[in-house]
Amino acid sequence: MLKIKLNERLVETDAKTLFALRDRVKPGADVVILNGAAMNADAPLADGDAVCFIKRGEAPSADELEALMASRHTPGVHAKVKAATVGIAGLGGLGSAIAIALARVGIGRLILADFDVVEPSNLNRQQYFVDQIGLLKTDALVANLRKINPYVVVESHAVKLTPDNILPMFANVDVMIEAFDRADQKAMLMQAFTAQKPDVPFIGASGLAGFGPEETIGVKKMGRSIYIVGDLKTGARPGCGLMAPRVGIAAHMQANLALRLIVEKGES
């Protein structure tokens, strides 16, 4: 019996060749990969080989996708990510990119809120498509997330957030992420949420405009559980607008910080 890795799972097989294994496991596979290379001809199998069979257009099952993610993240890390819930307020340049990044790593649950619709001007930095113009951002983003990872639980709210409705909407999140454009909305959310959930990490953003040096974007911790990503000074103005690269850097820093806080929670 040979021990090989099949679609990232360790299995034993008595199949001697690649195509014999394909015909047994997934006879409809259009793409056959052996140790990272696409194969057009049969080849002998050996202990330790890594094999992947793909049928074009077929989504992996929940178990298959989870096995793939666990193999990339390591099982212990993936278990923590899958068990976590992250709230995202605002689904523009920051929030849409954050949600996609977290869906790709297999976060267990996303709670999203935004009352706006996709406008043509959004497409310079937000994770939407031309044919989604006019749709609610909640609907458009959920559709996009479903294409990326259909097994993430997504709860969306097409509402304008106020101090009165932030909770219980985000009452059970492990991390809360602020992704608004306007300073007054940022302040409102931070004050309302942290006043009621002082122990839950809150990740905001400030100073993302333009195309200045990327290394000026950082993370500043404020108090026990508040983190702000950005340079804290560069706002949008003529000649210094909100653009995809710099906004994307900040969004992924927010997503990465959320991921780090989730994985490191409880560690000494």
Image (spheres, rainbow, N blue to C red):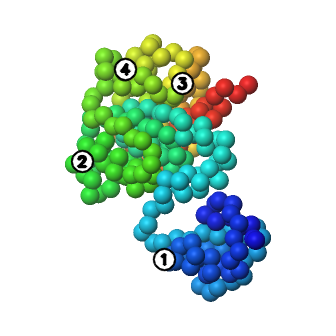
Residue 84, x across and y down, in percent: 53, 34
Check disc 3 and give the amino acid type. Answer: Pro
Q: CA distance from mark 3 to mark 1?
A: 47 Å
Residue 167 is labelled as 4
Residue 28 is labelled as 1
- Element under disc 3: loop
Q: Nearer the viewer, mark 3 or mark 4?
A: 4
The mark nearer the N terminus, 4 or 2, is 2
10 Å neighbourhood of mark 4: few (<14), some, or many (≥20)? Answer: some
- Element under disc 2: loop
- Element under disc 1: loop
Q: Is residue 70 above or below residue 92?
A: below
The mark nearer the N terminus, 3 or 4, is 4
Tell me whether the residue at label 2 lies in contact with that at label 3, contact meaning CB atoms closer than 8 angstroms. no
The mark nearer the N terminus, 2 or 1, is 1
Residue 268 versus residue 7: which sits nearer the camera? 7
Tell me whether the residue at label 2 lies in contact with that at label 1, contact meaning CB atoms closer than 8 angstroms. no
Check disc 4 and give the amino acid type. Answer: Leu
Residue 255 versus residue 172: which sits nearer the camera? 172
Lateral position of residue 83 relative to residue 146, left or right: right
Residue 59, x across and y down, in percent: 45, 62
Tell me whether the residue at label 1 lies in contact with that at label 4, contact meaning CB atoms closer than 8 angstroms. no
Check disc 1 and give the amino acid type. Answer: Gly
